[in-house]
Image (cartoon, rainbow, N blue to C red):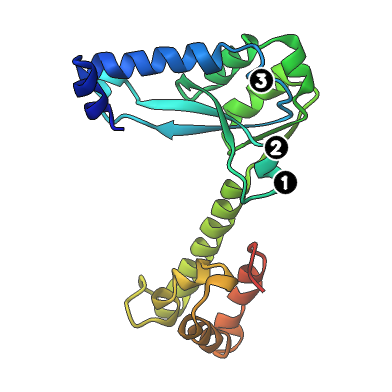
Amino acid sequence: MSISATAKTLGIGRVLTCQLAIDMCRELVYDDPVHLNGVQVIGADEYKWSHNRQVHGSGFVTVNVDMPRHYCDSTSPARLLDVVKGRSADALRAWLAHRSPAFRHQVRIAAMDGFQGYATASKELLPRAKRVMDPFHVVRLAGDKLTTYRQRLQREKYQRHGRIHDPLYKNRKTLLTTQKWLAEKQQARLDEIWAYGNYYGAIKNDVAGLPGHY
């Protein structure tokens, strides 16, 4: 049932309905002492939840999740632990500081993006945990590097930015697609690029380094 439908059924406003839902969720879930039991792998990432700077400032929050099953099996969803305002070392530091010493002691892996603030906070308050970059950001960084390399090759060969009929520019999205998801036509276009010789073929080594490629 939607927020609007719930508010209409209860005969109250949408704002009050949302606040009641948030309060009950915190009381029944987040304030439950067993909510954090057994958490050994946590993930921290930023999320842009509001674009209204006048009301919510930057609009960024830090999302903390429990991801042991997701860490071992990418098909399993992570479990939301909490959402805190801000995207800084202080935001994660404050959240961890409010957790029990037992919780901080049991965490063995902290997965995050490349933001130094999260790494600093986790290093201070989770000294036993191994800090790693989460798979999404690993692939994203690798893809960004590949795109930069593709653009450089494009400029070296044509002395200009890519155009629609240029082989590398035309296949810019295909180059970032996991091999198992490539259609036959996409694979054929990539094979044509590799066949151009050392100039275009050199990029194949970088593509091969991306997860799921060759």
Q: Answer whether labels 1 and 2 touch (C-beta < 8 Å).
A: yes
Q: Which tag, 1 or 3, sits closer to the chain's start?
A: 3
Residue 73 in the image: above or below residue 112: below
Name which residue lies at 61% across and 70% down. 207
Quarter of the picture holding the N terminus: top left
Q: Position of residue 21 (x, y in %)?
A: 37, 18
Q: Determine whether, in the image, residue 129 is placed left or right of residue 210.
A: right
| Amino acid type, mark 1 | Cys
Q: Which tag, 2 or 3, sits closer to the chain's start?
A: 3
Question: How many residues crowd around disc 1 within 10 Å: few (fewer than 14), some, or many (20 or more)?
Answer: few
Q: Determine whether, in the image, residue 104 is placed left or right of residue 52.
A: right
Q: Position of residue 181 (x, y in %)?
A: 53, 71
Query: Mark 1 highlights which residue?
Result: 72
Quarter of the picture holding the C terminus: bottom right
Query: Which label sits on residue 103?
Result: none
Name which residue lies at 44% across and 70% down. 172
Quick one: SS at disc 1? helix
Query: Mark 3 highlights which residue?
Result: 36
7 or 150: which is nearer to us?
7
Residue 94 in the image: above or below residue 174: above
Name which residue lies at 74% across and 29% down. 40
Query: Mark 2 highlights which residue?
Result: 68
For the residues labelled 2 and 3, the Cα–Cα distance comes to 12 Å
Counting the numbered discs, the total is 3
| Amino acid type, mark 2 | Pro
Q: Position of residue 182 (x, y in %)?
A: 52, 75
Residue 177 in the image: above or below residue 89: below
For the residues labelled 1 and 2, the Cα–Cα distance comes to 6 Å
